[in-house]
Image (cartoon, rainbow, N blue to C red):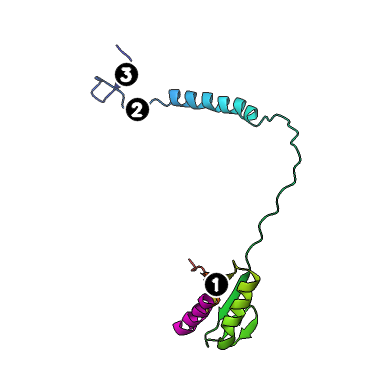
């Protein structure tokens, strides 16, 4: 009688199981190969590098922190600035650094008119880089 699986009637049937032994053998061989070759990959050749004067990193542009509160009051940094003086303040920043950036923080209850007037004054003064600062939503 041949070796195989038997059903309840006693007749021989093919097995429907996956033989895991070859898979485990292959995985163990691969593990051994990686254990042996991993130290060889981290081996480095000792090289004495030449010294050279490096160029300085380019300076970051001037950042204007502009905030508008819920009442429409505009602050540049921590200093409150009146609407008629805002464009002059922006022009001074552009004169100091042509690549100046404005980071605009507006209260969620601020009227759009105050935000638009501030952005318009910045554009007239020559500020071309304007970014909006927001809070990430809580998940």
Where's residue 135, x and y in %? 52, 70
Relative vertical location of residue 81 with respect to residue 52 in this rendering, above or below: below
What residue is shown at x 31% (from left), y 27% (from top)? 16
Is residue 111 shown to the viewer in this render? no
Q: Is 116 situated left or right of 75 in this image?
A: left
At which x and y percent is residue 7?
A: 26, 25
What's the mark number on residue 4? 3
Q: Is mark 1 on a helix, strand or loop?
A: loop
Picture quadrant where residue 99 is located: bottom right
Report which residue position mark 1 lands on: 127
Range covered by the magenta-colored residues = 107-124
Residue at x 74% of width, y 36% of height: 49
Packing grade of label 2 (10 A; few <14, some 14-19, many >=20) is: few
Q: Which of marks 1 and 2 is nearer the N terminus?
A: 2
Query: Circle 2 is placed at which residue position?
Result: 17
**Which one is nearer the viewer's eye here, 52 or 132?**
52
């Amino acid at each position: 009688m041949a070796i195989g699986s038997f059903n309840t009637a006693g007749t021989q049937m093919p097995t429907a199981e996956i033989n895991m032994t070859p898979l485990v053998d292959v995985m163990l061989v691969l593990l051994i190969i990686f254990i042996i070759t991993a130290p060889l990959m981290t081996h480095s050749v000792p090289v004495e590098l030449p010294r050279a004067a490096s160029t300085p990193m380019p300076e970051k542009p001037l950042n204007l922190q502009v905030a508008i509160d819920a009442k429409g009051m505009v602050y540049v940094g921590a200093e409150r600035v009146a609407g008629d003086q805002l464009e002059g303040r922006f022009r001074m920043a552009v004169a100091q650094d042509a690549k100046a950036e404005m980071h605009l923080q507006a209260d969620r209850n601020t009227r759009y008119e105050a935000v638009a007037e501030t952005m318009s004054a910045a554009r007239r003064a020559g500020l071309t880089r304007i970014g909006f600062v927001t809070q990430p939503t809580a998940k």
